[in-house]
Image (cartoon, rainbow, N blue to C red):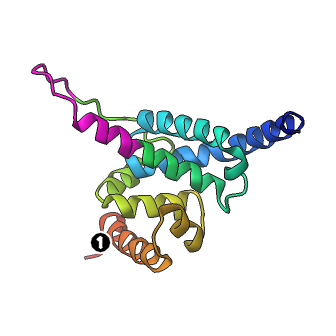
Amino acid sequence: MRVRHVGREHAQFAESYQVHRAACLKAVVAATGDRQGAEDLVAEAFTRAWMSWRKVSRHPAPQGWVVRTALNARVSAWRRRRREVALADVHDVVVDRDPGGVDATLMAALRQLPVRQREVVALRVFLDLDTRATAEVLGIAAGTVAAHLSRAVASLRGQLAPTSR
């Protein structure tokens, strides 16, 4: 019976990938500030989504699931890297010049926000999830989402709004 449904599941996943990939990438870029890393994270997250497609397709915000999975993969990779021994030969870090479709000034301002605020902005603004869906994706209360979004918007206004004197 499962074999008969694979074609339909594949089509549903392919459609979801086509519809949500760009928005998910933009949200992860906004949350991480790293275009190349975000592409890898989103690819990994969509791979995991395909592997669990029956569960993910029933999620209230599948694109939110993908973004949360990408951000979780980033944390897991960071945890693995921090246990590695640094080499004496230090390499320069290359700053990403392509912010993934996000205005460079906005990206610089987003990088100044705390991680949780960036995640909330990425899900609420770039993916257009409602407060409840954002809270579910991040595993926090809806009131906490609202508080983080409020603080993030106030901070971004302070950084981006022209001062009149």
Magenta residues (range): 74-92
In the displayed structure, does residue 82 sit left or right of residue 161?
left
**In the displayed structure image, the side of residue 36 where residue 129 appears, left or right:** right
The verdict on residue 78 being magenta is yes
Give percent across and percent down for residue 106: 40, 55
User: On the rendered structure, is 116 left or right of 2?
Assistant: left
- The residue that appears at 54% across and 57% down in the rendered structure is 126
Query: Within the image, what quadrant is residue 116 found in?
Result: bottom left
Q: Quadrant of residue 112?
A: bottom left
Indicate the secondary structure of the residue bearing disc 1: loop
Where, quadrant-wise, is the N terminus in this rendering?
top right
- Residue 44 picture location, percent across and down: 53, 35
Seen as rendered, the residue at the extreme front is 1
Residue to which mark 1 is pinned:
163
Pick the front one: 126 or 58: 58
Please tell me which residue is depicted at 17% across the width and 28% down the height of the picture. Answer: 85
* Vertical position of residue 156 compared to residue 109: above or below: below
Q: Position of residue 58 (x, y in %)?
A: 72, 57
Q: Is residue 47 magenta?
A: no
Please say whether residue 33 is visible from this viewpoint: no
Amino acid marked by disc 1:
Thr
Q: Is residue 160 visible?
A: yes
